[in-house]
Image (cartoon, rainbow, N blue to C red):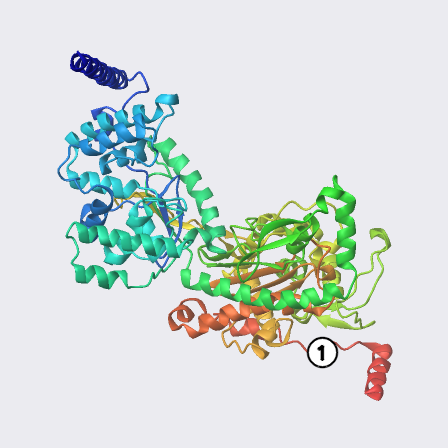
Amino acid sequence: MKIFRKNKTLVRLLKYLTSFIFLVFFLLFLLFSLVYLDVFGRLPDNKKLSSIINEEASLVYSSDTIIIGKIFAENRTNIKLEQIPNHLKKALIATEDKRFYSHLGYDSRSYLRVLFKSILMRDQKGGGGSTITQQLIKNLYGRQYSGFLNLPVNKIKELITAKRIEKIYTKDEILLLYLNSVPFGEDIFGVESAANRFFNKSVSELKVEESAVLIGMLKANTYYNPRLKPKNSLNRRNTVLQLMNNEQYLSYQATDSLQKLPLTLNYENVNLKTTAGYFVYQVKKKVTEILESVNETRNKNYNLETEGLEIHTTLNYSIQKIAEKAAKEQLISKQKQLEIELRSNSIKAKWFKKQEGKSLSLEKDKQNRNAELFDWDSTKIISGTKFDILWHYAKMLNASVLITNPKNGAVISWVGGNNFRMLPFDMVLSHRQIASAFKPVLYATAIENGFSPCDYLENEEKTYPEFENWKPQNADYSSTPDSKVALWYALIHSMNLPTIDLYFKLERELLINSCKKLKFPEITGNAPSIALGTLDLSLFEIIRAYGTFANKGEMNDLYMISKITDKAGNIIYESKEEKAERIFKTESCQTLTAILQQAVEQGTGSNIRNKYDIKSQLASKTGTAQSYTDAWFIAYTPNIVFGTWVGTSENSIHFNSGKGSGSSLALPIIANILKEIEKDTQLKNKYLTSFDIPKEIYSSIQCPPYKQKGIKGFWNRLFKKKTK
């Protein structure tokens, strides 16, 4: 009787178990059917799967074929099957899907584990069960949230799609699609981009241990990031090598040898470059405009961020590196000097008081907080009030450098500031007081309209009642009543009083017309101080103008892009040589250049010879704004124009001494760039060419000293002899 009851209970339990299993499989079948019928979202069909094209980053190249930037929705560079090293494929299969070549897109054993552990027993450590094919699908299409059925629905979706994709592509093609789409963190996708980032090489050049590092990252790309978590990455790399050994892809001896190697990186992130980013950003804006025009006129649909275009630019990477280095070294040195001055005066105290007066929540702003800030050594975390953080950047010296080819307007180097990622505002385009760097425009206009280098200008202080009793002075406060200086001499020494005399002798409208032709911003008002450079101009605008002087009176618009191709190499866009616009006569610019050459030999730019021993022929001009708020230096040869601006972001914070002048603050940057170019024979021969100015032009600036006529002149000369 007891046995009968036991058997009856056992039968009942078996019956319940059978019913339960049947119910589970029925529900799974029902769920599978609903997913298959797109109830939980449309599945990709065969047509869509057949046309999988991974989005690919567009690459920006310098003129010397160096990648200087990437433009992307996803930072990906696709590769071909033959580029993948065999050890990389083996590392992937051993680690992620050792039955990859035998299954049909899904692994039954893994799915049973997922069913009983992850779904029924709710064990999150039960394992994912995803094959490489299923991971590919997840990378391509993501996962939709389906409530409490989220896990089973997504697994079924991946299973169905995996079967479809396995019928369309070969196993190696699936591997290629996977390796081109898998995320590695840091906003990079695909193994080629990862190899570039962490080892600064192409995937085809990877060593076995390097492949193991990258494959190891797939489990958790932040936790196993070799830059951020080197110890975790090393342990994971060795695990991958051991898994390769388990599958007999590596011998015991090779595995042991490779596991003993240290973790070695050659990290290269072009998107964190301190200054090339400014140029790449401008290129991106321009390419977007070009593609919009191409798409509209040719009925195309090019996408800059997804189609792997190649953008070839005019930037010379060698000179760009030189310019970045020169600006950085000068700013580090001068920043220390500025901070010494700021500690010895009341500027800092006044600035803090002003900020506190503008604050809407003073108590909150005075609370300490941590902030990541740019510093020259690296980004650093500082603890301080909101005002401390703002002061860090307010007192920071910034520099912009722009170097162009005046013959065609090509941008050779563009340094927009100290660090694009942390300080993205582009100082090349910023409008600042141009100071004496404007004077050559006035003098060129005068020469164009009949003035001679040997015309004499008054060097006497005057008050102008009609302009609110304005009383200009020379920078050194000197003046010589009843005496005059030659026009050329006044320019090379950047004398203010003779410049104002020239301005009043020249018709104002002639100067305004020159400014219009040079595409300067509209000039309002009639203040004569414009002659001394009170106009706000950008480095971009003034360098384009000086290109006119270097190019014998013809101005070219500046451009950055030489060619755009698709990833197959087909040309989408190619820059065409535009006809330069005639601004001044050739002879006028040759005369001005001959004068500005003397600025290098004996004028405000003479430090470039005396201190830095630059040998090349140059024409140059410095600029120092009132109160040393802005420092400029511009120099040129027939084939290249150099320009730099240096200053702080706020005009209220500046040097109070000659250390903030153009010759002290800005000139050294260009001098050090020139020094490095002179060392490079190829660059020197290309850019630092001599001027072809006729001898009679040089003769025209050889003027006798001014001699005052009459009795007054005689007594003045006699008095000077006696005082000597």
User: Label 1 sits on what residue type?
Assistant: Pro
What residue sits right under mark 1 in the picture? 705
Q: Position of residue 208 (x, y in %)?
A: 23, 57
In this picture, residue 89 sits left or right of residue 702: left
Compared to residue 237, the image places residue 341 above or below, namely below
Quadrant for residue 524, please give it.
Answer: top right
Percent of width and height locating residue 537:
62, 52
Q: Is residue 453 visible?
A: no
Q: Quadrant of the C terminus?
A: bottom right
Q: Nearer the viewer, residue 337 or 372?
A: 372
The crowding category of the residue bearing disc 1, from other C-alpha atoms within 10 Å (few below 14, some 14 to 19, many at least 20), is: few
Check the image and report above or below for 183 versus 237. Answer: above
> Residue at point 43% right, 39% down?
288
SS for dot 1: loop
Q: Residue furthest left?
A: 102
Spot occupied by residue 47 in the image (x, y as percentages of width and height): 22, 25
- State whether residue 238 appears in this view: yes
Quick check: 568 left or right of 264? Answer: left
Q: Using the image, determine if residue 678 lies above or below residue 129.
A: below
